[in-house]
Image (cartoon, grey):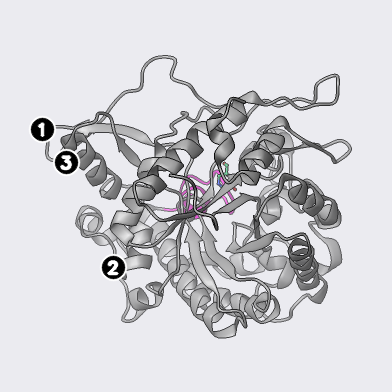
C-alpha cells in the first residue's frame, strides 16, 4: 500500500545543535552553554557556540531543504533565545529570528513543525532549581504562551518535549548530558513529573493562544521491543515487553507516555518503584493528561524478544555476532519502524508521526566534491519500507522526519557523529547535499515509489 497522498516527508534538527549564535542579539545562556564550558565533558571540548551557524545561514538552509523537496521541517525553539532569563522580559530579536525562519519556510512551501523544548533549558531557571522546581510547569507555560501568540498564526504543528527519557535520564541521572546532574532515582522521577506537568501547561497555552487551530503532539524516545519470531506468542511477548515498566531506569516507553496519554503512571512501575515514585498532588495527573492530536516518536532501533516461561513472559534475544551497527554502535533494526508505530497506536490510539529516525555515518567529501553515503540510503530505505508495511497493515502513520536535515552538534559526542542529509564542513560552514539527500528527494517526489526501485 502506498504512503497516503498527504503523507508528511520531513527532516529534523534542534536549536542548540545547529543554530550557533550562542550569545547573539540578547540570547541568554542555556544549560548546554554551561556544560560545554566544563572541561572534559564534551568530546574534544566542542561546543554549540557556532555549530552550523544556522542562526545566520537559515536562508541558505531553507533553500537546500526546498531542493530536497521536504514538505515539512521539524525545528526546535531555543527557550533562552526568546526569554534570556527563562521567564519575564522577552528578547524581541530572538523571537524575531523564529518569525523570519517560519516565514522563510512557508515561502518555500515547507511546513514548520515546532518543538518547544529540545534540551536547551535556560541557565537562569536551572539556578532556581530547574525541572526539580515545581514552578517549572508554570515557567514553561509562560514561554509556550509567548510563542503561541507570536507564531501560532502560521505554525500549525507543535511538539512540546523532545525525548524526556534523555533530558531527565541523561541530564539528571547519568549526568552525561546537561545539566550534568547525577541525582537519585526518586529525584529524577520528580524532575520528570514536573516536566510532564509543564508539557500539560504548554498544551493548554498553545490551544488557548494559537490563532491557527493547532495540532499538538510530543516526541519521546520509542523504546521498542519486537518479536524475534513470527508466531503469536512472540508477538504478544514483544507487546508486553514494550509496555513493561519495571526496571529502575527511564529507558521505557510507558512511564511518561501513560502519564501524558492516560493521566496515570503505569501500575507495574508504581509497584516496582514504590516510594521512589513521585507523590502526585491533586490535579497533577489531569494537567499532564491534555488531549493530543498525534503521537510523535523518535525511533532509531529496537530490541528483539521472544516468549519465555518466566514471570515476565518474555526474554531478550541476543543478536548474532557481527550484527550490523551504525557508527554510533546502534544496531540497524528496520523492524522498529513497523512494530514501534504499531504498538504505540495500539496502546494510545493516536495517529503516529515518526519525528526522528536516522544514523550516524563516517561521511567525507570525496575528491570530486561529492558526499557518497550509500549506508544512509540503504538504512533509510530499509526503515521506510517497514514503515510502509505498518501503513499497509492499517496503522495510521502521518509523517516521517529524517534525523537530521544536516550534520550537527551531537551533544556529549560533539561533532564526531554526522547524522545529516546535508554535509557541513565545520571549518567553512560550507554545505553539500549528500547522495542520500538526492535520493530522499526522489523518494519524496514519488511519494515513496523510489523505495521500490534500485538505487
Ligand atoms: O541528536 C539526537 C537528537 O538531539 C535527539 N534524538 C537522537 C539524536 C541522535 O542521537
Identified at 72% across, 24% down, the residue is 372
Q: Residue at x 83, y 72 (%)?
A: 93
Horizontal relation, residue 202 to residue 76: left or right: left
- Residue 15: x and y in percent read 69, 56
**Residue 145 screen position, x and y as percent:** 61, 80
- Magenta-span inclusion, residue 36: no
Q: Indicate the quadrant of ligand 1 in the picture.
A: top right
Residue 200 to residue 190: above or below: below
Q: Residues within 10 Å of mark 2 (few under 14, many from 20)?
A: some
Q: CA distance from mark 1 to mark 3?
A: 8 Å
- Looking at the picture, how far across and down is residue 366, in whole percent? 80, 21
Give the answer, above or below, for where 279 lies relative to 37: below
* Mark sitting on residue 162: none
- What span is in magenta? 167-183
Q: Secondary structure at mark 2?
A: loop
Quarter of the rendering containing residue 282 = bottom left
Q: Which mark is residue 312?
A: 3
Verify CB contact (< 8 Å) between mark 1 and mark 3: no
Going from N to C along the chain, the mark reached first, 1 or 2, is 2
Label 3 and label 2: CA atoms lie apart by 22 Å
- Residue at image location 61% in from the left, 30% down from the top: 376
User: CA–CA distance between discs 1 and 2?
Assistant: 29 Å
Q: Quadrant of the N terminus?
A: top left
The residue closer to the viewer here, 167 or 145, is 145
Could you tell me if residue 34 is visible in this image? Answer: no
Element type at marker 3?
loop
Instruction: Give the residue at the far top of this rendering.
Output: 321
Q: Residues within 10 Å of mark 1 (few under 14, many from 20)?
A: few
| Along the viewing direction, whichever of 449 and 279 lies nearer the viewer | 449
- 175 magenta-colored: yes
For disc 2, the marked residue is 264
Q: Where does label 1 land, which residue?
A: 309
Amino acid at each position: 500500500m502506498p504512503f497516503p497522498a498527504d503523507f508528511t516527508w520531513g527532516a529534523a534538527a534542534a536549536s542548540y545543535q545547529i543554530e550557533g549564535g550562542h550569545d547573539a542579539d540578547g540570547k541568554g545562556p542555556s544549560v548546554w552553554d554551561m556544560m560545554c564550558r566544563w572541561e572534559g565533558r564534551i568530546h574534544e571540548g566542542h561546543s554549540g557556540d557556532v555549530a552550523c551557524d544556522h542562526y545566520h545561514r537559515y536562508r541558505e538552509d531553507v533553500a537546500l531543504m526546498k531542493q530536497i523537496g521536504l514538505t515539512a521541517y521539524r525545528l526546535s525553539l531555543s527557550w533562552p533565545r526568546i526569554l534570556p532569563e527563562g521567564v519575564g522580559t522577552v528578547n524581541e530579536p530572538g523571537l524575531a529570528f523564529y518569525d523570519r525562519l517560519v516565514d522563510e519556510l512557508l515561502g518555500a512551501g515547507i511546513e514548520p513543525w515546532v518543538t518547544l523544548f529540545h534540551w536547551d533549558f535556560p541557565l537562569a531557571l536551572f539556578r532556581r532549581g530547574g525541572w526539580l522546581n515545581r514552578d517549572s510547569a508554570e515557567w514553561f507555560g509562560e514561554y509556550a504562551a509567548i510563542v503561541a501568540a507570536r507564531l501560532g498564526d502560521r505554525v500549525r504543528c507543535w511538539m512540546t518535549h523532545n525525548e524526556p527519557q534523555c533530558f531527565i535520564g541523561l541530564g539528571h541521572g547519568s549526568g552525561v548530558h546537561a545539566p550534568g546532574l547525577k541525582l537519585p532515582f526518586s529525584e529524577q522521577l520528580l524532575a520528570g513529573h514536573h516536566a510532564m506537568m509543564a508539557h500539560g501547561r504548554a498544551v493548554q497555552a498553545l490551544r488557548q493562544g494559537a490563532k491557527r487551530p493547532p495540532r499538538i503532539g510530543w516526541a519521546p524516545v520509542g523504546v521498542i521491543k519486537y518479536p524475534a519470531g513470527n508466531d503469536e506468542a512472540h508477538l504478544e511477548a514483544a507487546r508486553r515487553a514494550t509496555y513493561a515498566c519495571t526496571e529502575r531506569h527511564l529507558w521505557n516507553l510507558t512511564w511518561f507516555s501513560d502519564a501524558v496519554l492516560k493521566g496515570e503512571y503505569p501500575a507495574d512501575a508504581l509497584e516496582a518503584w514504590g516510594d521512589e515514585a513521585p507523590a502526585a498532588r491533586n490535579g497533577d495527573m489531569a494537567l499532564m493528561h491534555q488531549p493530543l492530536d498525534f503521537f510523535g516518536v523518535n525511533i532509531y532501533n529496537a530490541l528483539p524478544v521472544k516468549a519465555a516461561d518466566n514471570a515476565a513472559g518474555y526474554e531478550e534475544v541476543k543478536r548474532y555476532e557481527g550484527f550490523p551497527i551504525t557508527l554510533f554502535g546502534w544496531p540497524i533494526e528496520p523492524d522498529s519502524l513497523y512494530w514501534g508505530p504499531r504498538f504505540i497506536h495500539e496502546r494510545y490510539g493516536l495517529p503516529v508521526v515518526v519525528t526522528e529516525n536516522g544514523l550516524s555515518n563516517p561521511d567525507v567529501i570525496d575528491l570530486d566534491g561529492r558526499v557518497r553515503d550509500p549506508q544512509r540510503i540503504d538504512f533509510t530505505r530499509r526503515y521506510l519500507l517497514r514503515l510502509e508495511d505498518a501503513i499497509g497493515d492499517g496503522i495510521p502513520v502521518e509523517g516521517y522526519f529524517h534525523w537530521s536535515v544536516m550534520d550537527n552538534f551531537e551533544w556529549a559526542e560533539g561533532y564526531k557523529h554526522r547524522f545529516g542529509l546535508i554535509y557541513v564542513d565545520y571549518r567553512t560552514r560550507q554545505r553539500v547535499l549528500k547522495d542520500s539527500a538526492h535520493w530522499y528527494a526522489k523518494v519524496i517526489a514519488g511519494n515513496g515509489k523510489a523505495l521500490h526501485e534500485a538505487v
